[in-house]
């Protein structure tokens, strides 16, 4: 059972990380992709449903990785999970506050 939980936690990290990368930082970037002549993008409030969704996803990722840290007996797994938490927080911060 522990192996299944660890695999699930790492898959959740990978999917969440892909969502962080795929979510646009400005909700109007699709306009620039469709019409390249639009150079300045319209103002974005910066804190919308995208930010809340990615924050909740970050909390779930951190909780699952910290669950691995707590339940794991191997120091190597603990270090990998802590590094993954730090990487996900860093990517979220870089992506959310541009």
Image: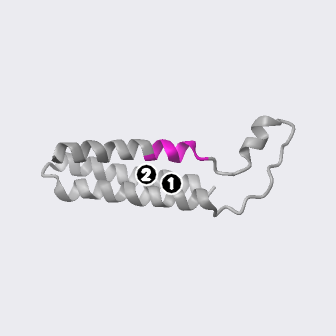
Q: Residue furthest left?
A: 73
Give how far across and how far down residue 24 sits, in percent.
63, 47
Q: How many marks?
A: 2
Residue placed at 49% from the left, 60% from the top? Answer: 55
Give how far across and how far down residue 22 sits, in percent.
56, 42
Badge 1 vs badge 2, beta-carbon distance below 8 Å: yes
**Foreground residue among 38 and 79:** 38
The residue wearing badge 1 is 92
Mark 2: which secondary structure?
A: helix
Residue placed at 20% from the left, 46% from the top? Answer: 76
Q: Is residue 66 above or below residue 2?
A: below
Q: Residues within 10 Å of mark 2 (few under 14, many from 20)?
A: many
Decide whether residue 19 is among the magenta residues.
yes
Give how far across and how far down residue 62 sits, in percent.
36, 57
The residue wearing badge 2 is 88
Q: What secondary structure do most residues of the magenta stretch adopt?
A: helix
Please provide the residue range marked out in magenta. 16-23
**Foreground residue among 82 and 57:** 57
Cα–Cα gap, marks 1 and 2: 6 Å
Residue placed at 30% from the left, 48% from the top? Answer: 9
């Amino acid at each position: 059972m522990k192996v299944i939980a660890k695999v699930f936690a790492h898959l959740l990290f990978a999917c969440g990380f892909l969502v962080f990368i795929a979510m646009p930082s400005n909700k109007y970037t699709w306009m620039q992709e469709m019409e390249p002549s639009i150079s300045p993008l319209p103002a974005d409030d910066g804190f919308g449903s995208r930010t809340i969704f990615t924050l909740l996803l970050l909390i779930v990722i951190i909780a699952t990785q910290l669950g691995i840290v707590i339940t794991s007996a191997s120091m190597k797994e603990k270090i990998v999970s802590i590094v993954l938490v730090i990487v996900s927080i860093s990517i979220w911060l870089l992506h959310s506050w541009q």
